[in-house]
Image (spheres, rainbow, N blue to C red):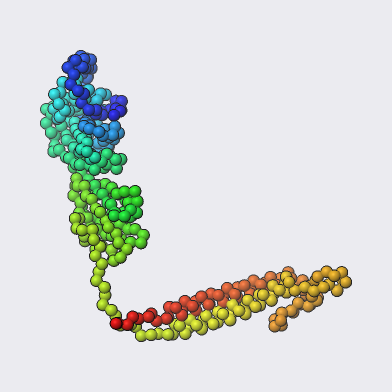
Amino acid sequence: MKRAPGRVSDVRPPVPDCGRFRRVVVNFAPVLLALTLGVSGAPKTGKWVVLVHIDGEVPSSWPEALRKAAETVRDGRVWTEPPAVTLAEAQAALGCPSWGPACAAQVAKMTGATTALLIDVTSTGAGVGLSAEAVLAANGQPAKGKNEVLLPDTSDDSLRFAAAWVKGALADKLPALLIVETATPGGEVRLDGKRAGTTELGPVRIIVDAPGTHTLLVTKEGAAPVTRELRLTPNETARELITMSAEGPPVAPDVRIGQPDVITPKPPLAPQPPPPLDNRGAVVGWSVTGVGGLVALGAGVFTTTVVWNLFYDVAICEDGTGRWCQPVEIKSPLGVYSYRGAARDTFNDVDGPLMITLGSIGVGVGGLLIGTGVWLVLAGAPEPTELAP
């Protein structure tokens, strides 16, 4: 385990070695004497120092992170730097028989602090035990009660909760840890309407700074949402396993912690008599569909005729060259328009493109009427009823 220079971190206590112990005492004796003399006249009221003691396999980032978290609490305390040696080295130099409040008090005196915040981090298998206790430097007696909590592992999520927990211990407002897991991954977790994450890659851990009554909502595409009303207490680690089902309504919001993760559907409603048939919507729908078909057909025929006259209607030119030219007279089969001679240029440049545009709009309007009529027919059609056996 690497130790950050200039910060209190922890290593496993060295194997007792009398010769090594004497060398450490001899080497550190001048340093301890200088520290004692240097801080004897310093003001001690309100001065605190954070001492993080590690026991077991805990990531090296924990001591520094927990110390910085504690020092963010600005409520009248004046924080001082811990000694520039490890706790194991300070313990050996001071001759403490074992680590504890008495030894922590002596280390606090080295830094000129009047109170030491003693944070013990102990690995317990896969989990981590965390405790925080304020110790008076004058006599090694506790300044207040001791708080303890058990974390599930040494992950970054656990470290974030540990930092929040240390700050809460100083302010007498311990947070709660809520761990939400779904039986199938992919559930989106919200607490009091705020998104907390998804269970796509594993459980979602939520640091609840203000324990009490909170509303948990878990949703997933294709499944009924699950709502639970949770009552969290300070310093609690609550686990919620959510089983989601594609059938049935959401779970009632008054479900209590510890109840089985079962979604109970509401009883079906009593069958209602079928409403009387109303075919008025179908009649109107068929009428609109018919009108739309006529409009679309007429506009389509008209547009096709104009396109034919404008781009495809040609005849052999009268100059005897054998080329193809527009006929002398351009007219529609139904006599809607007729252009002859020089007027053909007006048809080619202005009227023809305008007619195509209007005809296309007519086709669109007809299609819209057809779609509206079909929708009215389907909406007005009576639903089939099942006959009892």
Q: Quadrant of residue 225?
A: bottom left
Q: Residue furthest front?
A: 389
Residue pictured at 29% horizontal, 55% vertical: 183
Q: Is residue 309 above or below residue 19?
A: below
Q: Nearer the viewer, residue 269 or 167?
A: 269
- In the image, residue 171 sits, relative to residue 8, either above or below, namely below
Q: Is residue 113 left or right of residue 319?
A: left
Residue 237: image location, x then y, percent: 21, 47
Q: Is residue 62 left or right of residue 378?
A: left
Residue 26 picture location, percent across and down: 20, 14
Which is more toward the observer, 149 or 164? 149
Residue at (34% x, 83% y) in the render? 275
Query: Residue at 18% across / 19% down in the picture?
Result: 17
Quadrant holding the N terminus: top left
Q: Quadrant of residue 159?
A: top left
Q: Can residue 146 be seen from the camera position used here? A: yes
Front one among 116 and 226: 226
State whether residue 262 is above or below residue 357.
above
**Quadrant in the rendering for residue 189:** bottom left
Q: How many marks?
A: 0
**Which residue sits at x=42%, y=80%?**
380
Residue 240: horizontal and vertical position, in percent?
24, 53
Q: Give the percent coordinates (x, y) of residue 371.
A: 51, 75
Relative to residue 368, is residue 39 drawn left or right? left
Judge whether residue 208 can be spotted in this image.
no
Q: Quadrant of the C terminus?
A: bottom left
